[in-house]
Image (cartoon, grey):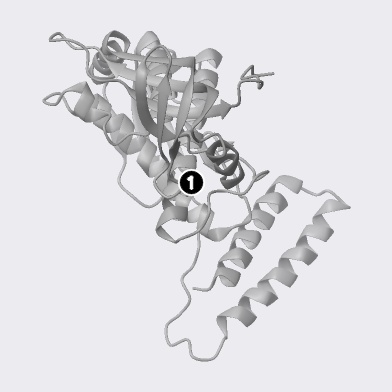
Amino acid sequence: MTDTLQFLQIQAIQLRKLLEDSADDPILRPQLEERLEDVEVEIRAAEAIPGELLPQESLSFPRAAIFLRGGGVLGNQGIRPALAGESLIQYEKMFTEQALHDERIWARTTGRQRRPRGASMPGLLFTGTPRGSFGLEFSPQPLGDPIVLRTHINSLQNVADALISIGTSDSTSLEERIQKIPARVLKPLKQFLNVLSHYGAELRLAFSDIPAKSLSVEQIKSASTLLERQLVEEEIDVTGVFRGMTHETGHFDLMSDEHGLITGFVADELTEDDLDRIGRLTNQRCMARLLKTKVQQVSGEAKPSYVLINALGPSGSLKVE
């Protein structure tokens, strides 16, 4: 399928959704119907390109849902607002960080730069409340690029895999469980499980194209307790000499005044322009903001990992407005 056809199909899906929401609006509905008719004509033309031997793949708008049961939920009739609201907030934060990470990996494997400055941040759209226990349905926010949309579909599944990995891998250490989870995903993941544990809720993650995944009340409570006890994350500001980084892998070295040599990876949301700016600090003194993650163990602390959030020259300010 060509990128053009994918883009047209996404437009058609969005227009049909807007038509559903427009009801009998005398002004908006005719405009949407006319635009949808034009797009469908373009789709038929794109599908008829000579040389295509197989029928074109149909692109469906990706949907996912979290179904909650137990504490804070009254069957399929209602849910406590705080449970629903906080669950969606933390789930979207997990998705955003995972999507940024997946975008960077995709860009690197295709030889492209990181996301351009000013690009819209990945996000979710709350689209409904499907029946069955109590469901909260959402879709990735459409950004106009069909390849990015497909990356974000994978991100939804990666978030689910991260939750299941943390909640069900009883035979492995926490350090092993979080190894493949992006560092910036861990904080909202921890908060998400804390909310469900507080209410005594059970979780089922459903998708339109793959089998559902589930965590019991007991698994959620156990995972929440483990993360609360062993996982420590904090943002720290350090000063020192920036020793450089690689654009391709995002690896950096910083000789800090207080902690000695710090190595790690730059944050996924940093753009190519950000990397150019930070790269000019090589072998110069700087102030850096880092996300420090460590797992506390009975036998002692594991070596912390670091993510570089930002770095500026000595005259700059890391204060977040």
Q: Position of residue 296 (x, y in %)?
A: 24, 12
Could you tell me how many numbered marks the image carries?
1
Furthest-bottom residue in view?
A: 50
Q: Nearer the viewer, residue 68 or 290?
A: 290
- Circle 1 packing at 10 Å, graded few (<14), some (14-19), many (20+), is some
Q: Is residue 312 left or right of residue 182?
A: right
Q: Note whether 230 is above or below 150 in the view shown.
A: above
Specify the quadrant of the image occupied by residue 306. Answer: top left
Q: Position of residue 37 (x, y in %)?
A: 73, 70
Is residue 149 at all visible to an observer of this figure? Answer: yes
Residue drawn where x is 32% and y is 10% of the image: 228
Q: Is residue 291 left or right of residue 174?
A: right
Q: Position of residue 52 (x, y in %)?
A: 47, 86
| Helix, strand or loop at mark 1 | loop
Residue drawn where x is 45% and y is 26% of the image: 76
Residue drawn where x is 61% and y is 58% of the image: 13
Furthest-right residue in view?
A: 27
Q: Amino acid at mark 1?
A: Arg
Circle 1 is placed at which residue position? 63
Q: Note whether 15 is above or below 89 in the view shown.
A: below
Can you say which quadrant of the picture contains the C terminus? top right
Q: Nearer the viewer, residue 118 or 38?
A: 118
Is residue 77 at all visible to an observer of this figure? Answer: no
Q: Position of residue 256 (x, y in %)?
A: 42, 19
Specify the quadrant of the image occupied by residue 311. Answer: top right
Q: Note whether 75 is above or below 36 in the view shown.
A: above
Q: Is residue 301 left or right of residue 73?
A: left
Q: Nearer the viewer, residue 125 or 270?
A: 270
Specify the quadrant of the image occupied by residue 71. Answer: top left
Q: Nearer the viewer, residue 205 or 26?
A: 205
